[in-house]
């Protein structure tokens, strides 16, 4: 084990066995169904439980970030246990106050407990793919400086595209207007969404039909990664069969050295809805 510990939040959608294998600490966000029901993402509400609940209620769930105190508590626990340096990598600050909470906690601790807080400017396993690569390096004994250098490369080399099955949840959560949602549904438009350099959701392209969307994503990845060795993560909201099929398609086109298929958890699922598929890719190193 190395002298660097990696912290992230539950929106990274990293499978539990991978969290445990790489000793990644995960601070949960919260999901609220009205005023009376609050759950910690991935702790007392799994992805499957969330989507079942979503389908059986008329309540539109809301989400909230962890408090600075939650991050401070986790940082203290890690440091007191092993006196390790800490790198904390989080959901885009344009989408949540999670990064800000982590940053406030790091400033409260000051120089006593060294924490580097990073805005991934991404969501779901687009965070996860970065966290997993840095955690693997840290577990091989890399220094904090080496981990941060690798992290800088990952932030430049990681791409993500989302395909939503319905525009309903984006409309409910204020990401698009009602007219756009109705029009998209009538025309069977499959919007391909991505995150820009600031970490904001934007419409990358609109195509008609799932197959055309997949072909466009593959084309875009070919231009960005070519024959490079890559780590591919597909996160999905109750669309496992489609996720497996898409991974198979990607294996036919690319040199995939690491692949992960995971669930889109309750917090991200609140905003994108069931049927969503997200594809995240980053370059591997020879180290």
Image (cartoon, rainbow, N blue to C red):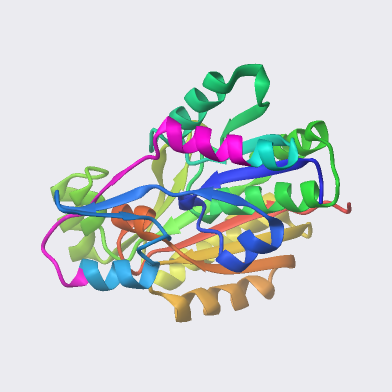
| Image quadrant assignment for residue 60 | bottom left
Residue 144, given in percent of the width and then of the height, sits at 78, 34
Pinpoint residue 149: horizontal percent, then vertical percent: 78, 34
> Is 18 colored magenta in this rendering?
no
Nearer to me, 52 or 277: 52
- Left or right: where 206 falls relative to 160: left
Q: Position of residue 220 (x, y in %)?
A: 59, 54
The quarter of the picture where residue 145 lies is top right
Is there any visible trace of residue 156 in the rendered image? no
Q: Image check: 161 left or right of 152?
A: left
Relative height, residue 194 to residue 211 (above, below): above
Most foreground residue, 244 or 112: 112
Please say if 150 is above or below 34.
above
Whether residue 264 is visible, yes or no, is yes
Left or right: 181, with 75 as reference point: left
Residue drawn at x 52%, y 32% is 72
- The residue located at (45%, 72%) in the rendering is 211
Residue at the spot 35% in from the left edge and 61% down from the top edge: 164
Which residue is situated farthest in the right direction here? Answer: 287
Closest to the observer: 100 or 81? 81
Residue found 40% across the figure and 70% down from its top? 210
Question: Vertical placement of 123 versus 14: above or below?
Answer: above
Answer with left or right where residue 10 lies relative to residue 173: right
Question: Which picture quadrant has residue 94?
Answer: top left
Residue sitting farthest toward the front: 80
* Range covered by the magenta-colored residues: 55-77
In this rendering, the count of numbered labels is 0
- Which x, y percent locates residue 177? 18, 44
């Amino acid at each position: 084990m190395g002298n660097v510990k990696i912290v992230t939040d539950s929106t990274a959608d990293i499978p539990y066995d991978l969290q445990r294998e790489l000793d990644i600490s995960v601070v949960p966000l919260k999901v609220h169904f009205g005023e009376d029901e609050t759950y910690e993402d991935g702790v007392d509400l799994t992805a499957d439980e969330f989507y079942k609940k979503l389908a059986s209620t008329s309540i539109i769930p809301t989400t909230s970030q962890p408090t600075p105190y939650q991050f401070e508590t986790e940082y203290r626990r890690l440091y007191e246990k092993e006196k390790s340096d800490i790198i904390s990598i989080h959901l885009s600050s344009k989408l949540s106050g999670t990064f800000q909470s982590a940053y406030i906690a790091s400033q409260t601790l000051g120089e006593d407990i060294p924490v580097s807080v990073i805005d991934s400017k991404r969501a779901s396993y687009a965070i996860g793919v970065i966290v997993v690569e840095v955690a693997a390096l840290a577990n091989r004994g890399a220094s904090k400086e080496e981990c941060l250098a690798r992290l800088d490369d990952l932030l430049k080399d990681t791409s993500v595209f989302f395909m939503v099955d319905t525009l309903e949840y984006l409309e409910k959560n204020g990401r698009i207007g009602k007219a756009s949602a109705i029009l998209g549904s009538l025309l069977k438009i499959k919007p391909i969404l991505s995150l820009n350099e600031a970490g904001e959701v934007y419409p990358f392209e609109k195509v008609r039909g799932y197959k055309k969307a997949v072909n466009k994503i593959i084309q875009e990845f070919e231009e960005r990664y070519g024959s490079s060795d890559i780590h591919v993560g597909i996160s999905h909201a109750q669309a496992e069969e489609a996720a497996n099929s898409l991974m198979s398609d990607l294996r036919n086109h690319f040199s995939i050295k690491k692949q992960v298929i995971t669930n889109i958890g309750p917090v991200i699922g609140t905003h994108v809805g069931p049927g969503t598929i997200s594809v995240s890719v980053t370059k591997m190193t020879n180290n």
